[in-house]
Amino acid sequence: MPSSTIAVADTDLEMFDAGDGAPVLFLHGCDGFDPGHRYVARLCEKARLLAPSHPGFGRSTLPDWITEVDDIAYIYLALLDHLQLDVVDMVACSFGGWIAAEMATKAPRRFRKIVLSAPVGVKTGPTDHLDIPDIFAMPEEQLAALMFHDPAKGRLDVAALSDEQLAIRLRNRESLALLTWEPYMHNPKLRHRLHRVDCPVLFLRGASDGLVSDDYLRRYAALLPDARCDSIPAAGHASEIEQPDAFVARIAAFLAASTGA
Amino acid sequence: MKAWHFSENAYHYLPPRETYDSIRVTLPNRIYDPEKGAALYDRFLDEWLVAEEEGMGIMLNEHHQTATCVDPAAPLMLAALARLTKHARLLILGNPIANRRQPVRVAEEMAMIDILSRGRLECGFVRGVPYEISAANSNPVRSNERHWEALDLIIKAWTTHDGPFSHEGRFFHHRMINIWPRPYQQPHPPIWISTTSPSGAARVGTRGYVQATFLTGFDGTRAVFDAYRRGWRGAGLGEHVPAHRLAYSALVYTADNEAAAKAGAEKLLWYVTSNKVPRHFANPPGYVPTSANLAMLRGAEHPLSAFARGASVEAAIEGGFMFAGTPDQVLRQIRKLYSHVGGFGHLLIMGQAGFLEHDETVAGIRHFARHVYPALQEEFPDTALTFDAPAAQRVGVGVA
């Protein structure tokens, strides 16, 4: 398995590194990184895929001082230094999209192109309505219905998972709560910083995503100078899992194009 | 042994249980009738005054966004009690300091109560049950660490008398801390902590605070008290833990005949059976350790949850969650738990719940106070030492 541990800023990061080609930093979503998913192999056919598990996710450590997504953005910029990668493409999903957006505002010159799939991280809607439904205040079945085009894919087969796999899932959830609880799923500052991200950015969402709405995606994209939106049919929040071929095709076309278009 | 009358100030005029998903967090407050609520406050205050009249202590707690306990600002109720009562010790158990944004404000509130009551405050602190997390918008992760930082800051605010100090901690920041008033009791009011987990109790034991545990039954309570004793000894506080350092809370109903006792006890079960809460509120991520969540996914269940499904007075007594019956029966039940857990010095009596009417509640308080409490005080004096149950039972010691 092409996984290793890299120590950056007193965090031990579990790191997946495979494939040939131009480097793509991949930032996973809420449920952590599973190299067994089809989209991983497909992306590796086209690029060198560098996928860290976020601090507190997978087998990455979570130092006490980490309390915000912003902290992870700095760790990952240091990771790029460590890997001696000056400029990369970045593909990020959901919660990972928030980290990616933070990174890009801090070091916009380090990214050639960015794909944000169902990203969270900004607040653009009214005060009395959550932009992202409260995933911590609903039954699992309801969450699965919002997350997946086919909610059956959201069912957790506890018996089929080892204790270690289950413990990782539980810890992922705990780390997600730590980092997204308040302000819920966003950094109020981020929207005022996104103007700095002037590379081409593709905003993607699954057409059936019940968490990141089409409105949300468009309002988010409008905060960046060179962003466009696209959607993937028959996919929910995790389109990389539900429609891996369409997900990879959209990304490959965007990254390969001579301009961002 | 000291006995305390504890009432959660529940609002029990609810629609049928199947018409709502949760009695906590999301139950719409249109269900709450302010007139009925005002009458309930009067009634519950009166019941606390009966407890004082009967020589018992007064205990109250705080929950939020719930019909089970309409006392979301316990310090306000405590302020009323401080003026309405004259002698009773006033136990708040407790201040949910992991969910309070300003520990210094809590220190001020408690100092005020201590002054108002002329030193009758027993000041409890709790991390807060998991369903408080949403109501407080409080991060469930690292709440234990927040709790301890807040507690240390509160104690320092109470005990610093020479002008301002500052606190720049992991969770809380405050410059110019210099509270007025300072507490009446010196150096500060007695501190209580409630926890139902052995790991929490061990830490409380190292500090020597009063440790309370709620509805943990025979084995759960023993595990908590054993852990407290380990912490106490490990910190060099002495070989034996005095009984007045340990408290147990149970549902208690006493009457002069078994039928009346059973009828009252049945109504008290509401406290356990009414607690309909969906899992996403009952167990937010990070509130319990990953290992505990893993055990739950593999089928483990909290003893109280298992009990609540088939709750009966008999099962509650059998499990050590309830003491109910005639005075002799209640005394025997308490004695049995006492020897099983290694002794304790405070009995926190959940003496009102749900549909237990005022007259019934008062009758329960008076029967206990007049026909059980004197024997308890004689048999288990405040000077008693607790003991490691198995060995101590064999040699028949338990009271110093």
Image: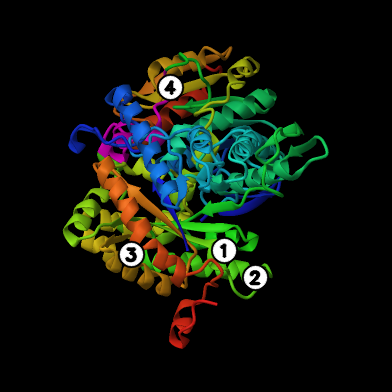
Q: Which residue is mark 2?
A: B234
Q: CA distance from mark 3 to mark 1?
A: 22 Å
Colouring rule applied to residues: rainbow
Q: Nearer the viewer, mark 3 or mark 1?
A: 3
What is the chain letter for disc 3? B
Residue at the spot x=46%, y=47% of the render? B58
Confirm whether circles 2 and 1 share one chain: yes
State the extent of the magenta-drawn residues as a range: A129-151
What is the chain letter for disc 1? B
Q: CA distance from mark 4 to mark 2?
A: 48 Å
Hey, what amino acid is under mark 4?
Answer: Leu
Confirm whether circles 4 and 2 share one chain: no
Depth check: give the residue in front, A31 or B240.
B240
Please check the rendered image and state whether residue B100 is part of the magenta-colored stretch, yes or no: no
Q: Which mark is residue B320?
A: 3
Asked if disc 2 and disc 1 are in contact, CB closer than 8 Å, the reply is yes
Hey, what amino acid is under mark 2?
Answer: Gly
What is the chain letter for disc 4? A
Q: CA distance from mark 3 to mark 2?
A: 29 Å
Asked if disc 4 and disc 1 are in contact, CB closer than 8 Å, the reply is no
Q: Residue A168's x, y, as percent?
A: 47, 52
Q: CA distance from mark 3 to mark 4?
A: 44 Å
Hey, what amino acid is under mark 1?
Answer: Ala
Q: CA distance from mark 4 to mark 1?
A: 41 Å
Depth check: give the residue in front, A21 or A148.
A148
Q: Which residue is mark 4?
A: A130
Q: Which mark is residue B202?
A: 1
What is the chain letter for disc 2? B
